[in-house]
Amino acid sequence: MTLPTPVVLAPMAGITNAAFRRLCREYGGGLYVSEMVTSRALVERTPESMRLIHHDDDERPRSVQLYGVDPATIAAAIRMLVDEDRADHIDLNFGCPVPKVTRRGGGSALPWKIDLFTAIVTSAVREASRGGIPLTVKMRKGIDADHLTYLDAGRIARDAGVASIALHARTAADFYSGTADWSSISRLKDSLGDTVPVLGNGDIFSAEDALDMMAQTGCDGVVVGRGCQGRPWLFGDLAAAFRGDPTRIRPGLVDVAATVYRHGELLAEHFADENRGMRDLRKHMAWYFKGYAVGGDARRALAMVSSLAELRERLDALDLSVPYPGADAEGSRGRAGSPKKPALPEGWLNDRELSGERRAVLAGAELDISGG
């Protein structure tokens, strides 16, 4: 699979649905990954899981990210995607730091168990290859500074035949706090050489950040997450940067308002429910208007819209002559949080192999988040 720009939209739960992916795609090329879907829910064909893997007719490549802890269930989910021609690319999530995932041994906790990680990746690659579909993995450095997994996991994934490896340069304990450790991306790239592409993730808030990461680490591409929240035009900046064009999108408030309304229209269409689309849009408002002088009352009103007509009215009431505010509109979006002790199964860190008793506990891990 060849991308016009070496940029991947990171899957973000509740964010990267088909509507947001379309909005981003309208600005630039790359790989736009769906929200994470639980493999068991997909095998069971729950309505929410089927919505999560929905792609617009013109969305190519169709990318799906799977979460799971059981090799057989993940293999069955991939078999379904292949047999029913529902994806052109599949990514496996080994990076989620959310407690409800890690406390059962999933996400960023899972690579600690080498045998389980190996079994999942090996079976997943085998099933995906039946349809000629590239399978990739996304992971973190490890659980915490004393329990790093990324170098071992990188070698295992390479040997299993993955198409690429993405590393978020933080541990689960870091959550999204502090500064991403780009040197770990360099170490992974040095460890694997040119045997498999390595993508870097963490603290890419501008096109210049992406260029800097690639120059500093030698990675083959970048994964963008929080940096594009409220700024889908970042993908336009990235496309320009990678073709050597210094042009950057610097939207005035009138441009931001137009993008917000477009996002609202896409969400209403995606959910086939205008009110639900507006409820989903509300969480994006603070990100879109970061740095712009719109006033507290207007922000609160926009964060409570319930229809497209109301959204139009609220946006038209803004002073749309406000220019791009500069640095105040850039940087991190959302709450970075603070370092925290990861929630893990009891005794999880005692050894790197999975006991038979622990396998039985893990069998229920997917059920906790089976809605995706």
Image (cartoon, rainbow, N blue to C red):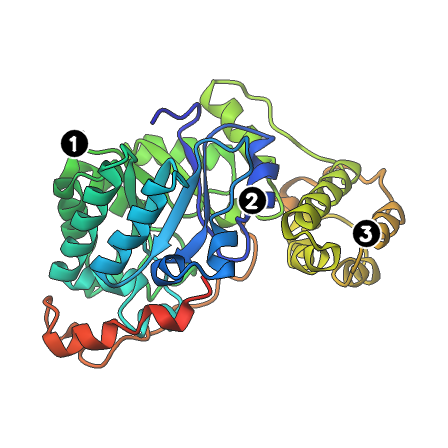
Q: Looking at the image, tell me whether mark 3 or mark 1 is earlier in sequence order.
A: 1
Pinpoint residue 50: horizontal percent, then vertical percent: 48, 53
Residue 193 placement: quadrant: top left
Q: CA distance from mark 3 to mark 2?
A: 20 Å
Q: Which residue bears the numbered disc 2?
A: 18
The foreground one among 46 and 2 is 46
Tell me the tag on residue 137.
none
At horizontal 48% and vertical 18% (from top left) the residue drawn is 244
Pinpoint residue 298: horizontal percent, then vertical percent: 82, 58
Residue 66 relative to residue 239: left or right: left
Q: Looking at the image, tell me whether mark 2 or mark 1 is earlier in sequence order.
A: 2
At horizontal 47% and vertical 18% (from top left) the residue drawn is 243
Q: Which residue bears the numbered disc 1?
A: 195
- The type of residue carrying mark 2 is Ala
Under circle 2, the secondary element is helix
Under circle 3, the secondary element is helix
Q: Which residue appears farthest toward the bottom when viewing the image?
A: 346
Under circle 1, the secondary element is loop
Q: CA distance from mark 2 to mark 1?
A: 32 Å
Pointers 3 and 1 in contact (CB under 8 A)? no
Numbered-mark total? 3
Question: On screen, 285 above or below 97?
Answer: above
Residue 166 relative to residue 7: left or right: left
Q: Which residue bears the numbered disc 3?
A: 311
The foreground one among 307 and 191 is 307
- The type of residue carrying mark 3 is Leu
Q: Quadrant of the N terminus?
A: top left
At horizontal 64% and vertical 30% (from top left) the residue drawn is 249
Pointers 3 and 2 in contact (CB under 8 A)? no
